[in-house]
Image (spheres, rainbow, N blue to C red):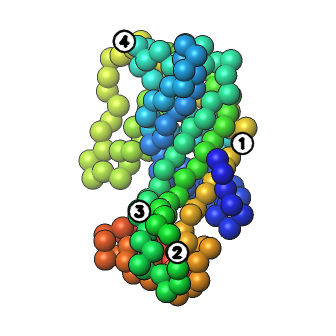
Amino acid sequence: MYIPQYFEVTDRKEILAFIKANAFGQLVSSVGGRLFSSHLPFFLSNDEQSLICHVAKQNPQWEGIKDQEVLVTFQGPHDYVSPSWYSSPGVPTWNYQTVHVYGKPELITEAEELKSIVNEFTEIHESSFEKPWEPEYKDSLLNVIIGIEIKITELQCKYKLSQNRSESDRKQVVEQFQKRGSVRLSQAMNVKL
């Protein structure tokens, strides 16, 4: 991804926190000679060196993926920026936060490992509920999924939050985002001011 220096984030801890907070991503690989994308929830391995997900066996993306380098993209808050919000000339643009993860996938087909993936996924997402659902499903349901562990080889992170504009312009963009209801994006910009 193209990342001008003032938009680049290199702090691994911050990047991994972003992934955890925006865990629904796009797995991109080649299927039959064409780019193919699956929209999936991911979680990080305990050592934070891999991304883990699962796909339906009917999804053709898992077949042949093992020998490829894959790309997983994660999108955070984003919104349009009007040049009318600036005190100096500008052009229409878009502010956003995104992470790209490159890696090497390994397939997970063993029933106990698949069960562990589903249980971990459930624990992550049910833990905030007042009455979390306890995993109770027939083991035969694991026969319809394939787990994928993607060993992270490269992280790229871009926060395009008007860092190339004056402080007064950035404050005006934050104010406009708040008026428009882009709360998460205005909060991200306030952190970077």
Which mark is in front, 3 or 4?
3
* Marked residue nearer the N-terminal end (2 or 4): 2
Mark 2 crowd level (few <14, some 14–19, many ≥20, 10 Å Cα): few
Helix, strand or loop for disc 2: loop
What residue does disc 2 label?
90
Helix, strand or loop for disc 4: helix
* Marked residue nearer the N-terminal end (2 or 1): 2
Q: Is residue 9 above or below residue 82?
A: above
Spatial CA distance of label 3 from label 1 is 27 Å
Helix, strand or loop for disc 3: strand
Q: Residue at x 50, y 25 (%)?
A: 36
Image location (x, y in percent) of residue 58: 40, 13
Q: Nearer the viewer, residue 188 or 96?
A: 96
Mark 4 crowd level (few <14, some 14–19, many ≥20, 10 Å Cα): few
Which mark is in front, 4 or 1?
1
Spatial CA distance of label 2 from label 1 is 33 Å
Which mark is in front, 2 or 3?
2
* Marked residue nearer the N-terminal end (3 or 1): 3
Q: Residue 140, labelled with which disc? A: 4
Which mark is in front, 3 or 1?
3
